[in-house]
Amino acid sequence: TKNILNSRTLEPFRSKEEYRNFMSVDGNWGDQVSIEALSKFLNTTVKVIYTNDNGNLDLYPVFNPGCTREYYLYFQKELHYQAMILK
């Protein structure tokens, strides 16, 4: 939990319990830890796309690679994701 920042204070969480309590409050959004845990729990691959400094789309390292189901998220801004449907 030392590397996970509280989105309200931008300070690291002091413990797993503090993180769990924060994430259990209605209105707090998921983060990279939540995405990785959910991808493993649902046995799905999650790919996160973002716009790099050159204005091109790029891909973060994949969560839970090798599964038959894949989901895509777009990392829009700091601490915000959008679901994507690829056609």
Image: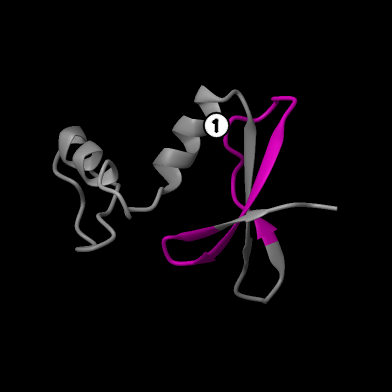
Q: Does residue 7 show up? A: yes
* Residue 4 point in image, percent of width and height: 30, 47
Q: Quadrant of residue 84?
A: bottom right
* Residue 86 point in image, percent of width and height: 79, 52
Q: Does residue 1 show up? A: no
* Residue neighbourhood size for the residue with mark 1, other residues' Cα within 10 Å, grouped as few (<14), some (14–19), many (≥20): many
Helix, strand, or loop for circle 1?
helix
What residue is at 72 percent from the left and 30 percent from the top? 69
What residue is at 19 percent from the left and 63 percent from the top? 9
What residue is at 60 percent from the left and 23 percent from the top? 43
Q: Which residues are magenta?
A: 58-81
**Residue 69 falls inside the magenta stretch:** yes
Residue at the front extreme, as displayed: 26
**Residue 61 falls inside the magenta stretch:** yes
Residues 28 and 51: in front is 28
Query: What count of labels does the image hold?
Result: 1
Q: Which residue is mark 1?
A: 39
Lateral position of residue 85 relative to residue 62, left or right: right
Q: Amino acid at mark 1?
A: Ser
